[in-house]
Amino acid sequence: MKSSKRAATENNRGISGHMYTLHQRLFHALSLGTRVYDGKESKWQCTDIEIQRHVIRSIASFLDCISGDTLQHPLVKDSLADIVGAIVWILQNKSKAILSMATNVKNEEGCLKMMSLCCEPIVKAIIDGMTGWTSHSGKIANDQMSLLVEACHLALISRWAGEHHDFLWQQGIDRVLLNLLLNDFQDEPPQKLLSPEEQLSIAQEGLKVNFLLGLRPYVWDILGWLAIHCREDFNPNMHGRERRIDILIACACISFMDSIRKGHQICQNDIADTFRSEAASRAVMMMIYSPCKYIASKARFILYEILRPASKKYLKRLLHMLNNTPSEDNFGMPNMLQTSINLVALVCYSGIPYYQSDIVKNGGIQALMDLIWWCLRNDIHIGRWSLAPHLHNILSERTCCWVCKEDWEGNNILLFYGLWGLAELMHSGSSRNNVEIFGGQLDYTEAEFVSTLQEICSDSTSPGIKWYGAFILNYFGFYGFPCKLGRRIGKALNVNEYADVQLILTNGNSLSVHGVILSARCPSLLPPEEMPGYEKASNGSSVGYDTERKCGKFHKEIRLSSHVDNLALAKLLEFVYMGYLNAGEELLKKVKFLAKRCSLQPLLIMFGRRHPKWGTPFPRYDLSLVLAPAGHYFSDIVLEAKATESICWRCNVCSKSVPHMHCHKVVLWSSCDYLRALFQSGMLESNSQTIKVPVSWEAMVRLVNWCYTDELPIPPSGCLWDNMDSEERLSVLQPYLELCWLAEFWFLEEVQNISYKVIVSCLDSARHLSIKIIKIAADLSLWKLVEVTANFLAPLYRQLCQSGDLEALDEEVIDMIRTTSVRLSQEG
């Protein structure tokens, strides 16, 4: 790898020391293999399994530290050829142990990075692994079976969208999956079309053989994710895949039918069969809701045909089972799995228009709302990985420096399915009006349910759950993406405090707004000259405006065109400030027009009431853009941190020589009760252009980040934390200690809670820091933290006395540690 030499000559500019260290580890790992030259191309090779393990770990760690900023760095670019060569050769080597390791490090971020480097050869290696087997009398040799399982593990990269889906189809993934389901499947010429009855017959007879039952959960999951990420215009007729895809859909629908036909509580002896049923049912659900028109329509048609003879009987039994949700005390694996299957089945039923009115008439909406309420009330958290053992190796394992991100549906799969089914029914046109839905309801009212959905959108970490929560809110006239930061900034809506822009309509009416909020959330409402450093919106002039500078209270008046409706503009500003708006159908048409002119694409998606696309990130409310130099135009306050000798400060905007940030009063006013009171107190400080924040620069940066993004950066974890010495760890925790103290005086409860949890979680893995932490906490009068830290130190009380480490502490603190030590010893 020539990259290490280049890195040395360029003095590692543009990369962190940690990234350079990981690169060196990778360089040394790859140097243990050999290069074989095939014509002009060199290939990395090594048959030693331990070296292969070492290389996989090193690649995973190095890829994890690569970001968009460093992807084009010479050190990274020069490493790619070696990384690609090693990965592809190791996959083609087909070692069970190494394939398993490769599976465990391909989370979404890692998968996309790898696919951007070498998508086609990796996909080809996976397909080769899934096809390199032979069957004798319906059986496969144990060594081949082990490799086949690991190859199927790798094929679960289909769970994430990306160009690898195109290559999976090109490499014949449909043929591969069909061969794994049906032994000796004869792939006849594509021009020979089969009737639906013939397709179902082939599928039925093939599944009866029970070929490779252990692989079926993988097959169903791969098929489901292929469907949910498929392109809308995908046409299997053009590629000769129609027959194979039709039979795959038929196989999944038959398995789905078997699962709901049983419809009984799970017994221990058929748990494996139920795991397979869960995966098959989920695959059908994802095909029914596939963006691909062919797959979705075919799945709905085949499932309807299969269900038709006894559909109403099964539907009533399904709703009856969902209405008898077990209590939290006996909600073990069988009940979790059965409830999950029932929910998936109801979501499938809801996707077929013929059954929607029957579901509503039989109380389907009420059953789903009750289950959603039950999940939230009992704080149920069940990730799908706990219901699908074949996913365990991917989601529960991780290598050094590699953090597995939560999947799109999150760690509350029952809530996710419940919201999905409810969203489909409410938007189907078969649901009753709100009065009938909530009539006679004792547990919650419509207002309470709407508030709950808004809390789900604000608090959940799952993008899928948040999307469906927001999608259901459309039914009640709420459009957008509720969030905590929007709730805070929304306080400034229709408030003249710190407003610096007036939007004037042709009828003379005007609205006072804050330029900094518009610049971050809807720049099309501002003239281009108000946006230094920003690109002019392509349709910025379509709103129509005429600006005029004023010397009075307002810095700018913007006269809007006659096409802008006053009420529609007010509703649009509601979305800009709060993240969502509430509007009836008549006004909605005018808001849509204005939103389109302002290029608010996420809001337009909600207006269209289209299903969320699987894997789509939930739109983020983020004001951090205005902290950059481009946002200084709107700055009206400076936050100044405590000066330290270690920081050499230089500002591109002003001449202040101490660490500071150019901020905006309206954001601080909305986020902090203390600053709101200070600004409005009439005291000298209220008119000052500078606020001195009594914490270090590092702490202040984190605080401001929270004000503008609702996120408080957390310290590094894993080996990054483990490899730090005591001083480095203390310097990492110091800002959070300061924030704990400041948050108490500034009434920032959320900041204090997050900081407190960060400190306590780090103490558990760094007990030797407890002496220093408890001293700082005591000096800052953080007695809750002192008490917790005393609990960490109490078991070591005698050793600490002998070593003299306690001498630096006050008697009050020492006595607290002593008392806790005695109590723990008495409790045994």
Image: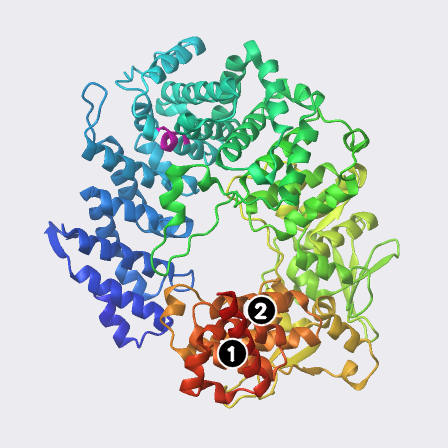
Question: Residue 473 vs residue 503: left or right?
Answer: left
The correct choice, above or below, for 427 with respect to 484 in the image is: above
The correct choice, above or below, for 437 with respect to 391 in the image is: above
Q: What residue is disc 1 on?
A: 773
The correct choice, above or below, for 258 with respect to 733 in the image is: above
Return the residue nearer the eye: 566 or 145. 145
User: Pointers 2 and 1 in contact (CB under 8 A)?
Assistant: no
Q: Position of residue 234 (x, y in %)?
A: 44, 29
| Badge 2: residue crowd in 10 Å (few <14, some 14–19, many ≥20) | some
Question: Residue 29 vs residue 342: left or right?
Answer: left
Q: Residue at x 39, y 33 (%)?
A: 222
Question: Residue 24 vs residue 68: left or right?
Answer: left
Per the rendered image, the range of residues in magenta is: 216-220
Return the residue nearer the eye: 827 or 478. 827
Give the amino acid type for the residue marked by disc 2 in the picture.
Answer: Tyr
| Badge 1: residue crowd in 10 Å (few <14, some 14–19, many ≥20) | many
Q: Which color scheme is applied?
A: rainbow
Q: Residue at x 31, y 77 (%)?
A: 11
Q: What residue is disc 2 on?
A: 756
| Residue lying farthest to the front in this orientation | 826
Asked if the stretch drawn in magenta spans residue 539, the answer is no
Return the residue nearer the eye: 791 or 36. 791
Give the amino acid type for the residue marked by disc 1 in the picture.
Answer: Ile
Return the residue nearer the eye: 406 or 485. 406
Q: Quadrant of residue 171?
A: top left
SS category of the residue bearing label 1: helix
Q: Position of residue 48 (x, y in %)?
A: 14, 52
